[in-house]
Amino acid sequence: MSNHGPVHLEGFPASDGIALGRVRRVDWRVPEAPRVTVRRRDRHRELERFQEALRRARTELEEIKRRTEALLGPVEARIFDPQILMLEDPEVVEGTNRYISDNRVTAARAFEWRMLELSELWARTSHTMVLDRLNDLHDVKLRVLGRLLGLPSPWDIGRASDAVIVARELTPSIVARMDPERVRGLATDGGSRAAHWAILARSMQIPAVVGLGEVFDRAREGQRIIVDGRSGQVLIEPGGRDAQRFERRRNRISGWTRRPLTGAEGENGAVTLDDVPVTLRANLDLPGEAGRARELGAQGVGLFRTEFLAVGRHAVPGEEEQYRAYRTVAGTFPSDPVLIRIFDLGGDKFPLFLRMPAEGNPFLGRRGVRVCRDEPGLFLTQLRAILRATVHGDVRIMVPLVNTTGEIAAFRELLDAAKEQLQREGVPFRDDVKVGAMIETPGAALAAAELAAASDFLSIGTNDLVQYALAVDRTNTGLAHLFDPFHPAVPRLVSLVAGAGRSAGIEVSACGELAARPAGALLLMGLGVEALSVAWPSLPEITNLIRGCRMRDVREAAATARAAPGGTDVRRAVEGLLAGPPDPGLSSQPAE
Ligand code: PEP
Ligand code: MG
């Protein structure tokens, strides 16, 4: 397909930052093993070749794990554990050996069959989370088959210094080998923000957009490309004006990032021109990110996602390991709130150790707080670890996907059980730890007054709130254009929650991606949300945004937005406040 003029694609932001570079297409499709029959007396040679390929793959993966640990830390390095375990999984190894022995096929063909069988089995019988497991399986398959067939490394991505990798999908091994000095950005047809490779990209600070659907077919090798990992937009062969606007935006952001936000200026936090302070906290996916968030001026952590401890693991994470992770973050912010969210499992995040039956609609199924009822032991351990961390700072507990006060009451009972255990054991913790509900459904927003009465704080998860308010699956790449956080339903629901919090005298914060978009941050502030929590790389941009506006104007604009008839009008109401040329991150107009 030839492209005339710029191509504009919308996907999902997966790793923050703006990249301008040249397309480098990476096609890593797993090769097909030739059909060759093996003589009976050669079977042993094939069995031995398979063992040698497994040993070799293990050595390579352990080396990648070591390198990743040295570069990014031990938590990130564990991303490779599922693959290493797969190499000794009897389902993989014995299954392949059986095919070699019984069917007289080569090791490559036997392994290919077995992996195909397993991927079909897993795809049929499991949760969406299995996607990540399948991605690991493809990574392993590519590595072992490549060895058995004597193919060159598919991970070689050339030496260009401004490469933007465009692929159907990526894998942890491919991303781990990238040099962030040379690879500017990533753009993929598939993938999700929760994919292991996307977590690695975030740690390596390589901007990424996933779920673009057709970027691999639309992009040609060497074309100019822009990847905006903040808004989820990708432009191929952008026009001069678009390129300049993105470049200006990137330079502005990197200027703010370089300027220190700590010291006197940082302590003042984010205050508007008319002297209204807005609390700005960081969203963290991994404990190692806490230090950087602090350097960038975060006034605490508004969302510490703890799923990294559970997802992709074969065993339940222990109390000690969890405690160490929570203590690291609490210790980095000893005098600011640190909101630790309990495992938000279900939907697209399911750990391997929870063998739960498949559901027709995982996002409407056992998810968030609902999982506490099924797995009290898992959460009791987590609550013990969080309670132990409360002595290191102002640690608060956040409960996802709450709809009813009954769910909060049941959660508090579980928390009391954890407290009793620690008390009996003489382990110190803060008894007055705050418990907050995440408002992520229209039902919860409409019942915000009741939920506020039962909570110590509320936090609006705009990603899910938009998904459930508009009935648009947030992971469905074909519906990205319908996932519109500026739909009029959103400001109206947010306004209800902010009002309920104000009446109850408790804090209302927002921690979804909307808070990190300039127009979104203004909208939330203007609607009465007191604290914003954004992905840590967005802190400088949002700090500057707050410092450059007057709260009086922001409230006025938000009032207009709340009464606006359509998404375009909502956006327009707040975009008018943004200084300078229109933000390219906001120039697209999703369908209404
Ligand atoms: C949200 O839903 O907005 C949120 C912050 O939680 P997550 O994205 O982890 O579901
Ligand atoms: Mg959520």
Image (cartoon, rainbow, N blue to C red):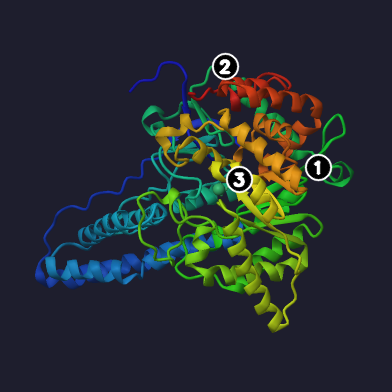
Q: Can you say which quadrant of the picture contains the N terminus?
A: top left
Q: Three-letter amino acid code at disc 2?
A: Gly
Residue that label 3 marks = 447
User: Which callout, 3 or 2, points to the residue nearer the camera?
Assistant: 3
Residue at the farthest bottom position: 425
Q: Which mark is residue 260?
A: 1
Which one is earlier in the sequence, the residue at label 1 or at label 2?
Answer: 2
- Say whether residue 207 is visible: yes
Residue 463, percent across and down? 55, 41
Which one is earlier in the sequence, the residue at label 1 or at label 3?
Answer: 1
Mark 1 Cα shell of 10 Å, populated few (<14), some (14-19), many (≥20): some
Q: Is 568 situated above or below 449?
A: above
Looking at the image, which residue is at 58% across and 28% down? Answer: 488
For disc 3, does the CB lie below 8 Å from ligand 2? Answer: no
Q: Is 446 situated above or below 122?
A: above
Residue that label 2 marks = 240
Q: Is residue 363 left or right of residue 331?
A: left
Q: Is 7 situated above or below 148?
A: above
Q: Three-letter amino acid code at disc 3?
A: Ala
Q: Quadrant of residue 490?
A: top right
